[in-house]
């Protein structure tokens, strides 16, 4: 089954802390909704741009996308 990485972008001097905090909410969502996958994370792309992400299965993507409104998405490769 295809896996998709939903991505939230955060920019500015507090981007890393915001992305880290956003991941906590993604983990809470996974616990509440009991999604198929439990893959989340955050990373700093540069000093002014960080991301938080959540990996979902193809069949879960649309309802999760509509509920959480990620900024973008890409195929997830382990």
Image (cartoon, helix red, strand yellow):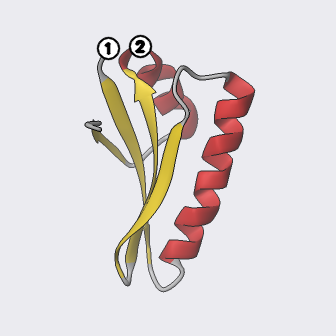
Residue at the spot of label 1? 1
Which residue is pictured at 54% across the width and 81% down the height?
14
Which part of the image, by quadrant, shows the C terminus?
top left
Relative placement, left or right, of 16 versus 11 is right
Secondary structure at badge 1 equals loop
Q: Are marks 1 and 2 in contact (CB under 8 Å)?
A: yes
- Tell me where residue 19 appears, x and y as whole percent: 53, 64
Q: Nearer the viewer, residue 18 or 36?
A: 36
> Residue reaching furthest front?
78
Residue at the spot of label 2? 59
Labelled disc at residue 35: none
Kindly report which numbered mark, 1 or 2, lies closer to the viewer in this rendering: 1
Using the image, determine if residue 18 lies above or below residue 31: below
Which residue is pictured at 50% across the width and 74% down the height?
16
Secondary structure at badge 2 equals helix
Using the image, determine if residue 78 lies above or below residue 34: below
């Amino acid at each position: 089954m295809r896996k998709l990485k939903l991505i939230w972008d955060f920019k500015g001097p507090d981007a890393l802390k915001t992305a880290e905090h956003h991941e906590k909410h993604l983990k809470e969502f996974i616990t509440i909704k009991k999604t198929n996958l439990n893959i989340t994370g955050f990373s700093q792309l540069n000093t002014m741009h960080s991301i938080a992400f959540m990996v979902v299965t193809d069949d879960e993507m649309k309802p999760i996308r509509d509920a959480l409104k990620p900024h973008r998405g890409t195929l997830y490769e382990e």
